[in-house]
């Protein structure tokens, strides 16, 4: 009898034999005494939609400019498609960049803007016309070809800038806060359109953003940056569900943090004595010494209401509802669980109702499973 074997394809970053399309090798960029990028190594694979995520001043835009060739590293090397481009000027790299301001030429039409780079490369007129038409069709702005930038909406300017960036068929497209100038609703719609476009054309995208939701929606993988360093690289799911340290846990989404010390281990389960006076039991495969200070991170949606509070229960706490935010699809509750601890809980509003499930001043019991969070040591 033959047995079917599940052979799921590895993602490139999971395959030790895969060759990176972009390789940043121990790159540092100094401006005087300031390390804007500090000893960063990073591999990006062909066809990825990769995001550099962080707050202002974390070094993400500097790293993008180093890839583009607009700045040069103080030390380290940069490779694109197997070639060392560290010292190569931007106009000789197989790279194009779309700026946050879109940088469209105001005196040119959409058609002329898209054609500009092709003219600079002295592409024959007929080929230019075909390529421009292809880009305008791809971005669905053919009817806008004769308009100038001041006659376009924010979303239309964004599409025109993207068409111009893609017209030269770059191997690598760099996007600096590409949706930052759009309003919330248009930004949400454009996120999915940009992902679908990238999948169709297969170009490797590297984007810079401070918007967590934008990075989570669009990216195959995310690098979270702080103070010139990369703190974690993972898929959106991995970043959210398994943050590697406290900074990443707090930066991505909302999180409850409970500090304590390891008091017992039983296989993969560790028991943590917390400042709330209640022990918590969490799954943690990593070896941890008894007495080691740790932080338990629990997302608000992982917490559920308990029928009753029990003194002998594990991962159960009680408190008093202090604040309520009704957001339509969910309600957010801030529950006072200790003198210095407010626990945030999110409940989905599945059934239509006119009153909140909980009310101000109500005492509640809350709980979660040992696999609903992570134990952080950093």
Image (cartoon, rainbow, N blue to C red):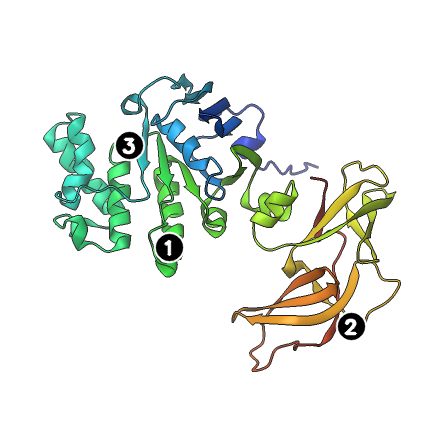
Is the N terminus in the top left, top right, bottom left or bottom right quadrant?
Answer: top right
Q: Which residue is drawn at 39% across and 22% down?
A: 72
Q: Is mark 1 on a helix, strand or loop?
A: helix
Q: How far apart are marks 1 and 2 (CA)?
A: 41 Å
Q: Is mark 2 on a helix, strand or loop?
A: loop
Q: In which quarter of the image is residue 32?
A: top left
Q: How far apart are marks 3 and 1 (CA)?
A: 25 Å
Above-or-below relation of 369 to 172: below
Badge 2: few (under 14), some or many (20 or more) residues near its Cα, within 10 Å? few
Check disc 2 and report the residue beneath it.
Answer: 307
Check disc 3 and report the residue beneath it.
Answer: 169
Q: Front-most of 28 and 234?
A: 28
Above-or-below relation of 355 to 158: below
- Residue 8 tag number: none
Q: Front-most of 242 and 4?
A: 242
Q: Which residue lies furthest to the bottom in this view?
A: 354
């Amino acid at each position: 009898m033959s047995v079917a074997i599940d052979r799921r394809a590895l993602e490139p970053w999971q395959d030790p034999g895969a060759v990176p399309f972009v390789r940043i090798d121990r790159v540092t960029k100094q401006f005087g005494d300031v390390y804007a990028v500090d000893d960063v190594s990073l591999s990006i694979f062909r066809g990825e939609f990769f995001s550099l995520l962080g707050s202002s001043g974390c070094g993400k835009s500097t790293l993008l400019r180093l890839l583009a060739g607009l700045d040069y590293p103080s030390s380290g090397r940069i490779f694109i498609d197997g070639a060392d481009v560290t010292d190569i000027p931007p106009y000789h790299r197989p790279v194009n960049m779309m700026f946050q301001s879109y940088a469209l030429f105001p005196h040119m039409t959409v058609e002329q803007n898209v054609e500009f780079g092709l003219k600079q490369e002295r592409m024959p007129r007929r080929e230019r016309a075909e390529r421009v038409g292809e880009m305008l069709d791809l971005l669905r702005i053919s009817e806008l070809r004769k308009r100038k930038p001041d006659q376009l909406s924010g979303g239309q300017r964004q599409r025109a800038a993207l068409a111009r960036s893609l017209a030269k068929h770059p191997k690598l497209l760099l996007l600096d806060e590409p949706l930052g100038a759009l309003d919330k609703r248009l930004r949400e719609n454009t996120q999915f359109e940009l992902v679908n476009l990238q999948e169709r054309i297969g170009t490797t995208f590297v984007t810079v953003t401070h918007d967590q939701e934008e990075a989570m929606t669009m990216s195959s993988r995310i690098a979270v940056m702080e103070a010139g360093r990369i703190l974690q690289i993972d898929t959106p799911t991995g970043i959210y569900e398994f943050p590697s340290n406290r900074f990443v846990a707090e930066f991505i989404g909302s999180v409850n943090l409970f500090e304590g010390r390891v008091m017992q281990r039983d296989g993969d389960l560790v028991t943590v004595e917390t400042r709330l006076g209640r022990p918590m039991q969490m799954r943690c495969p990593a070896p941890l010494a008894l007495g080691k200070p740790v932080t338990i991170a629990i997302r608000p949606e992982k917490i559920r209401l308990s029928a009753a509070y029990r003194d002998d229960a594990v991962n159960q706490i009680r408190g008093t509802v202090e604040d309520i935010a009704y957001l339509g699809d969910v309600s957010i509750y801030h529950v006072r669980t200790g003198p210095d601890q407010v626990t945030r809980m999110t409940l989905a509003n599945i059934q239509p109702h006119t009153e909140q499930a909980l009310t101000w001043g109500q005492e509640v019991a809350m709980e979660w499973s040992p696999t609903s969070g992570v134990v952080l040591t950093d």
